[in-house]
Image (cartoon, grey):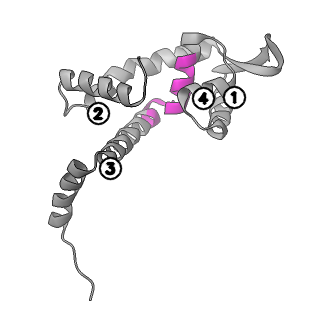
Amino acid sequence: MAIKTTDRAQMIYFPRLAGERLDIALCRASAAVARAAETQADEHGIGVGQHLVLKMLAAVGPCSQQTLSEELRIDRSVMVGVCDDLEKAGHVRRERNPADRRAYAVTITDSGLGLLAEAETSVPEFLDRTFQALTPAERDHLTALLGKLLNVGD
């Protein structure tokens, strides 16, 4: 005989589980933020990966796909697709790397800078909506804790 679970029991269990298992809570929070980011991306016509690539290229200049992949923690095979899509749309171009003629550097175009500027205008509202349960001080604290976990900002 199968045991029936109620919606109420399921609603009570997860908070307890999240309290006991920080890893589970962090994974679920990450998934929820990722879903919100993808919804935001769909609304604004630029994927999260595309946004990150354009942002990095604007900040540091031309880079290899390998550097973009490593620095942004985007799988290499996914990065190829991201760069292909951005190139087809005219937002980046691939050029021979003058330092290594066997490699290519990805460079942001004026079109890419424009798309990035548009995308950046919606980020503060997105962050406010996504993290509305946290006070500004709690958001700062969470940022510091996550940075510590990820060994960034040292």
Q: Quadrant of residue 4?
A: bottom left
Q: Amino acid at mark 2?
A: Thr
Q: Mark 4 — residue? A: 70
* Numbered disc in front, either 3 or 1: 3
**Sequence-wise first label, 4 or 3:** 3
Q: Mark 1 — residue? A: 88
The local secondary structure at tag 2 comes to helix
Residue found at x 54% / y 14%: 114
Q: Nearer the viewer, residue 7 or 26?
A: 26
Give residue 10's position: percent from left, percent from top.
21, 63
CA–CA distance between discs 2 and 3?
19 Å
Task: Confirm or deny contact between disc 1 and disc 4 (CB under 8 A).
Answer: no
- Would you call the spot at circle 1 few (<14 residues within 10 Å), some (14-19), or many (20 or more)? few
The local secondary structure at tag 4 comes to helix
- Would you call the spot at circle 4 few (<14 residues within 10 Å), some (14-19), or many (20 or more)? few
Q: Amino acid at mark 3?
A: Ile
Say the numbered circle drawn on residue 130: 2
Q: Mark 3 — residue? A: 24
Q: Amino acid at mark 1?
A: Lys
Quadrant of image for the C terminus: top left
Give residue 116's position: percent from left, percent from top.
51, 18
Say the numbered circle drawn on residue 35: none
Main SS, magenta region, reads helix
Instruction: Give the magenta part as a residue range.
Output: 41-56
**Sequence-wise first label, 2 or 4:** 4
* Numbered disc in front, either 1 or 4: 4
Give residue 35's position: percent from left, percent from top.
39, 42
Task: Confirm or deny contact between disc 3 and disc 1 (CB under 8 A).
Answer: no
* Numbered disc in front, either 1 or 2: 2
